[in-house]
Amino acid sequence: MLMESRFRPSQECVDLARRAVAASDEANNPAQAGHVNFVLGLIELCHGDFGDAAEQCGRALAMAERTGDLVLQSRCLTYRAVAFRRLGEIQRSVRQLEKRLRTDEKTDETV
């Protein structure tokens, strides 16, 4: 739905993503839950809900850190930085990008 809407998701798309998060939280699969939470954050960001997006990407980031998913960590940090930038919180945005660079260095070491 996100790509079909040219990255301008409807409220219905946001609601569906929130339901997916609720379902994934019950499934007891931390890796899947991290990804689904990230997708909700991305949808919220594209919908213009920047505060919710930053919070959701932060939640997904914590899950990715627990599971050791460096790629998801990098994605979460990137879009969280965008959300903070859109909120006018430049220093928080910069901190996310600095953390992303450190995460990318770890990713390079494992390849």
Image (cartoon, rainbow, N blue to C red):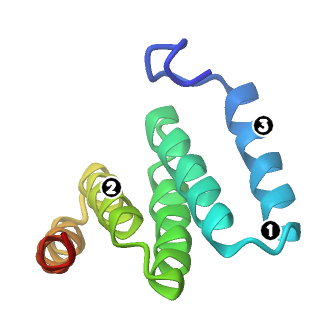
Among the two numbered marks 2 and 1 on one chain, the one whose residue lies closer to the N terminus? 1
- Within the image, what quadrant is residue 59 found in? bottom right
Mark 3 Cα within 10 Å, few/some/many (few <14, many 20+)?
some
Q: Is mark 3 on a helix, strand or loop?
A: helix
Among the two numbered marks 1 and 3 on one chain, the one whose residue lies closer to the N terminus? 3
Q: What element carries label 2?
A: loop
> Residue at 86% of width from left, 67% of height from top?
27
CB-based contact (under 8 Å), mark 2 and mark 3: no
Quarter of the image with the C terminus is bottom left
- Within the image, what quadrant is residue 92 found in? bottom left
Nearer the observer, 68 or 111: 111
Horizontal side of residue 106 vs 14, given as left or right? left
Query: Residue 16 bears which disc, if any?
Result: 3
Nearer the observer, 20 or 69: 69
Q: Where is residue 88 in the image (x, y as percent from the top left)?
A: 24, 57
Residue identifier under label 2: 87
Among the two numbered marks 2 and 3 on one chain, the one whose residue lies closer to the N terminus? 3
